[in-house]
Image (spheres, helix red, strand yellow):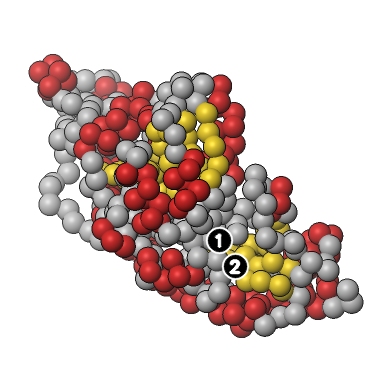
Amino acid sequence: MTTDSGRDPATALIHHAYQPPAGFAAMQPAIHKASTVIFPNVAALRARNWKEKSGYTYGLHGTPTTFTLEERIATLEGGLQSLLLPSGLAAIALVDLALLEGGDELLIPDNAYGPGKELARNELARFGITHRFYDAMDAGSLAQAIGPRTKLVWLEAPGSVTMEFPDLAALVRVARERGVTTALDNTWGAGIAFNAFGLPGGAAVDISMQALTKYPSGGGDVLMGSVTTRDEALHLKLKFAHMRLGFGIGANDAETLLRALPTLALRYAAQDRAARTLAEWLSQRGEIARVLHPAIPGAPGFAHWQATCRAAAGLFSVVFDARYTGEQVDAFVDALRLFKIGYSWAGPLSLVVPYRVQEMRSQPTPYAGIVVRFSIGFEAVEDLIADLRQALERALLAA
């Protein structure tokens, strides 16, 4: 059996002549999926350069879909170039592996994201890359820690779990004066709360990294990270490592991000409002010794947040009064009905996790009680307050 073209149907289906008409336009960009990219001739195959977004060479190195998402993330961050990665931790790993080699030293805030610290303690250490922790709330601590082998300083604003907001501009200036590259974990800010490349006094980080898993996705169903820069040479250094390590993302995940980005600012603002309301309510409860929310007056680094930011994420922690044991605080968490127990944040569902912060830091912490972190979703604030009230009364009223 043959078709009108004289070919077997199996061949005709693979090499079909039909091409849809050009000119289709819709609200959402088209989604392109490919591993192999087809070249019109050998000259095109040899001429195309994967380092630039002027053509396509292989699906891992970019499609119209991933190029579009990269450009939108760069715009969100105030950068000029972005790379996409399978997770936020993969983005941290890319920066470390692209910029460091055996004999170099890495400086990390003591209150930084835990898995990034574990990467330094394990894989980087095996490569002969050393690390030290510094107090992000003291620019003098960073100045003292920088040595002749220091090649990269990580920044994080605010700190993981305990939510201290550092003087980012001062930290950047210290590193810049010593000729050391700075990389910021900007997942909390998400490109909305502040511009990492436009800090007070004209300071700017060299690299802004995000876990797009959080706010840009917003659905709790995508794993992705990004690395954004404004310097072409630095971007290419990262991009070479990105290529050699084989990092890539799926087109369906890119589609999800592209659909979510137009509502990012609205979602961020709504969760910001709700989180501040809940933080203020908890600050009036006798069970709570302290509320850790950068935008609440009196919180660690509030003045730095005020000088740097125009918004805050829907994330905060509380320190329970020291009279409550870890078991009692765990019972409070278990008693919550709307808040679900789980890592990550920025999705539609409110989350809660208890932490023993003393076990997470190399330096002493000022918190004697158990710390509990809340990620606020889109439930009605009144319902979340009622849930907190009933859990406090059920688990702690008799204590």
Q: Secondary structure at mark 1?
A: loop
Count neighbours of disc 1 (C-alpha within 10 A) and say few if under 14, some if 14 to 19, many if 20 or more: many
- Left or right of 154? Residue 50 is left
Residue to which mark 2 is pinned = 292
Nearer the N terminus, badge 1 or badge 2?
1
Residue 279 point in image, percent of width and height: 59, 75
Residue 206 point in image, percent of width and height: 31, 44
Up/down of 14 relative to 363, above or below:
above
Tag 2: amino acid: Leu
Residue to which mark 1 is pinned = 163
In this view, the residue in front, 243 or 55, is 243
Looking at the image, which residue is at 59% across and 80% down? 280
Up/down of 88 relative to 312, above or below:
above
The quadrant in which the N terminus is found is top left
Looking at the image, which residue is at 62% across and 71% down? 291
In this view, the residue in front, 118 or 290, is 290
Residue 102 point in image, percent of width and height: 46, 21
Looking at the image, which residue is at 37% across and 48% down? 174
The quadrant in which the C terminus is found is bottom right
Looking at the image, which residue is at 17% across and 44% down? 20
